[in-house]
Structure formats: structure tokens, C-alpha cells
Image (tube, rainbow, N blue to C red):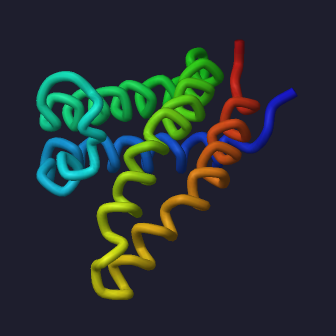
Amino acid sequence: MTTSPRAARSLAVFMAAAGTGHFLVPKPLDAIVPEQLPGSARTWTYISGLAELACAAAIAHPRTRRRGALATAALFVAVFPANVKMAIDWRDKPLPLRAAAFGRLPLQAPLVVWALKAAKDHKG
């Protein structure tokens, strides 16, 4: 059974935009890469951007949509530690920035749900 392709199309656009942002404006993303990861933060920013672009491409094609959307759900879970790091690092920032950093944490759950919904729209 498939669902409306709207969830998949919008997720593909979202992931393409997010992935592109990693290359156009990498510096803010470098700052939230956990220090425990080996190598440079910029490398991890680019790797995660490539992963987002690959997920977008996979979601865009009906034949690979299910796997791409499931990979996207896993990616949303994998980047959660960066969002936690951002919230910790920004705990002394002005309220609007603090609210944005802490607001990202509960947003991961609906992103995962969105990806799982998109995974239901596949041919294959």
C-alpha cells in the first residue's frame, strides 16, 4: 500500500535544501559537530551534507524512495547528538537563540515520523 507522494516530495526538497546548506553556509554547522568525532568539523559538515543530498535523491525516485526515506529517518536520529551539543553550547545565549537550540531537540521526532511516512510511498 502506498500513501500520497506529497510527504515524499516535500521531504526530498527539504533534504536537498538542508544538504545544500552544508556547502553554502558550513561554519554554523561546523560549530555543532561533537568534538568526540575524529577529524575536522568541516569534514563532518560536508559528509552530513552529502548524506542529506543522497537521501534527497533516493527519496525523489519511487524505486529507491523507501530505502532513502528509511535512511533519512536514521540520519535524523544520527544527528541528534549535534542538536544536543548545540543546546548545551547555547545555554548562555540570549533567549531567542537558546529557544531555537532547545526547540530543535523535540523537532527530531516529527522529522523521523515524516521520513517514515514518506517510506510508505514507494513502488517496489
Closest to the observer: 83 or 112?
83
Q: Taking 42 as reference, is 47 above or below it?
A: above
Q: Is residue 113 left or right of residue 71?
A: right
Which residue, as the protein is rendered here, is positioned at the far top?
Answer: 124
Q: Is residue 34 left or right of residue 100?
A: left
Which residue, as the protein is rendered here, is positioned at the far bottom?
Answer: 95
| Residue visible at 44% across and 28% down in the picture | 55
Which residue, as the protein is rendered here, is positioned at the far right?
Answer: 1
Q: Residue 50 placed where, x, y %?
A: 28, 28
Q: Residue 5 placed where, x, y %?
A: 67, 41
Q: Is residue 110 left or right of residue 93?
A: right
Q: Taking 81 as reference, is 83 above or below it?
A: below
Q: Residue 90 placed where, x, y %?
A: 31, 69
Which image quadrant: the C terminus? top right
Closest to the observer: 83 or 26?
83
| Residue visible at 51% across and 70% down in the picture | 103
Q: Residue 37 placed where, x, y %?
A: 27, 28
Q: Is residue 39 left or right of residue 74?
A: left
Closest to the observer: 54 or 78?
78
Which image quadrant: the N terminus? top right
Q: How many marks?
A: 0
Q: Taking 67 as reference, is 59 above or below it?
A: below
* Picture quadrant where residue 63 is located: top right
| Residue visible at 62% across and 26% down in the picture | 70
| Residue visible at 66% across and 47% down in the picture | 114
